[in-house]
Image (cartoon, helix red, strand yellow):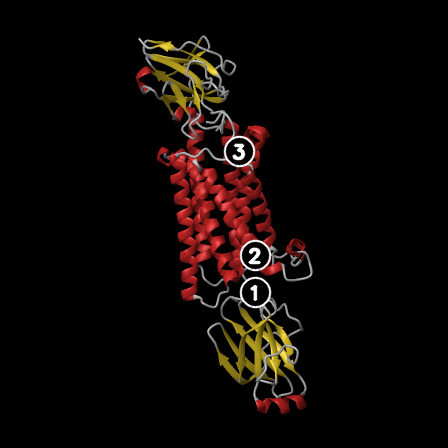
Amino acid sequence: MIKPLRKRHLQIWTTLAVLIPLGIILAWIAIPKQAKDKLLQPASTQAFPNVLASAEKDNYTVRVRSNNDTSQLQLEWINKKTLTYPTATIYWTTNDMKDDIDSASLIGRIEARGTYYFLFANNKDQIQIVAPKGFHFFVYDFIHQKVMDTITF
Amino acid sequence: MGASYSAISWNRQKKIYDWIIFSFCVIYLTTFILLTAIFNPNYTFETVLIRSTSTLAVLILHVILSIGPLTRINKRFFPLLYNRRHLGVTMFCIILVHGAFGILQFHSLGNVNPFVSLFTSNTHYGSVADFPFQALGFFALSIFFLMAITSHDFWLHNLSPKVWKTLHMFVYLAYFLVVMHVMLGVIQYETNPVFIIIMIIGAITLITLHLIAGTKEIRKDNIEYKLRQDGFVFVCEVNEIEESRAKIFCIDKERIAVYKHENKLYALHNVCKHQGGPLGEGKILDGCITCPWHGYQYLPQNGQSPPPFKEMVNTYDVKVNDNKVWLNPTPYPEGVERPGACIK
């Protein structure tokens, strides 16, 4: 190696010795504690006070919450691990016999680990009709076009 | 050395080297896929392929980047340097699979051209957590591509060594892009700390190796030879140089190798014409100085490669007085014959 090249190598690695640790530290600090909601609808970031139903799975915890006068229902989705499928949209259906996106209501989309809140019902009359029947949600991957999981309360 | 270009001049050592690379890659990928199938059966095949190829490529990249400084620190690592470019091309092929499946998985099922989608689906360049890390990976892949397609000696000669070397120095930029691609990508989502630990250990290892090697080389460059007489500089005693070997001295601007061969001393420019290897760290085989990196040869008396090869290096005057070696650092043009200094 000629002398100018040796000098160039030393300059480059001295620069990298500063930039790489800096980059690693900045990226580490920026790791989100709670996933940002890149949702298909605006959602609240506060949990409603009443838990109506709860389900625990390996990768996530799902709860249906309501406000105090049960005029609004909220789906709380806690993603415990990174998703293993490319996309995950959540649908709500009143027909637990059929996971069909055409007849279901799109609630939102989950991505990274963290906690998500989706408002999925805000009509008190409707809630009073559907609530006794239980709640049925399914997770749909629109890239592979298949239902990845179902949650029924 | 080759008088004409062939794709690869296979020899036993290259075959062994390449078989080791191939076997390692197969074992690694198979193990990764099997372990994922056991511990994370929900992962899709595309995800497994993307992750397995990415981790393998990062591992190989760290090995490649550590070979250079390791050979400066300890000559036992020279065999790794011999076919380093094969390792580089292999890494590129693996990372190409990773990039192709990544684009397929995340950008190809929409109504936008996948390569346009790569740059337009996420434009949060002002955010750290949401930074479009895939673009960083794309640029790193582009650099590796250019390096892989110009890895053959054909390009070394036709682009000129200076241009070729400048292009291949971009590997360091590519390394930085890879680190940030990982840190701003998978690390932002993955709970398992093993990824960040691997990246930190890899970066620390490389930085340390390069700084140690660089500091060692600078110390060699800064040795002063103060005793001068009639244009000659006293460099060492005759018995400090082994038979058929050289001792390297850095005088004024460049390094000069002084060889002992058949009771004479010869001085040549230390830098091999092929890829800048340290001729002085090689030995004389069949009467030719042989570069330890890739085996290029030069005749000690004139710095010329034996016919039909045409490479030449500068020669220098050397003399011996009372067992003391004196060297004139003014170079003769490349290939000029100079009589060796007799050792009495």
Q: Which residue is mark 3?
A: A8
Q: Which kind of residue does numbered mark 1 sit on?
A: Pro
Q: Position of residue B90 (x, y in %)?
A: 48, 44
Whether residue A120 is visible here, answered yes or no, is yes
Could you tell me how far apart the alpha carbons at marks 2 and 3 are, in whole angstroms? 34 Å
Are the residues tagged 2 and 3 within 8 Å (C-beta)? no
Q: Are marks 2 and 1 in contact (CB under 8 Å)?
A: no
Q: Are marks 1 and 3 in contact (CB under 8 Å)?
A: no
| Residue at position x 49%, y 31% in the image | A6
Front tag of 1 and 3:
1
The label shown at residue B178 is none
Would you say B117 lies left or right of B56 here?
Answer: right
Report how far apart the C-alphas of labels 2 and 1 lie in the structure: 10 Å
Tell me the SS state at disc 1.
Answer: loop
Looking at the picture, how far across and down is residue B253, in whole percent?
50, 22
- The secondary structure type at the circle numbered 2 is helix
The answer to whether any part of residue B226 appears in the image is no
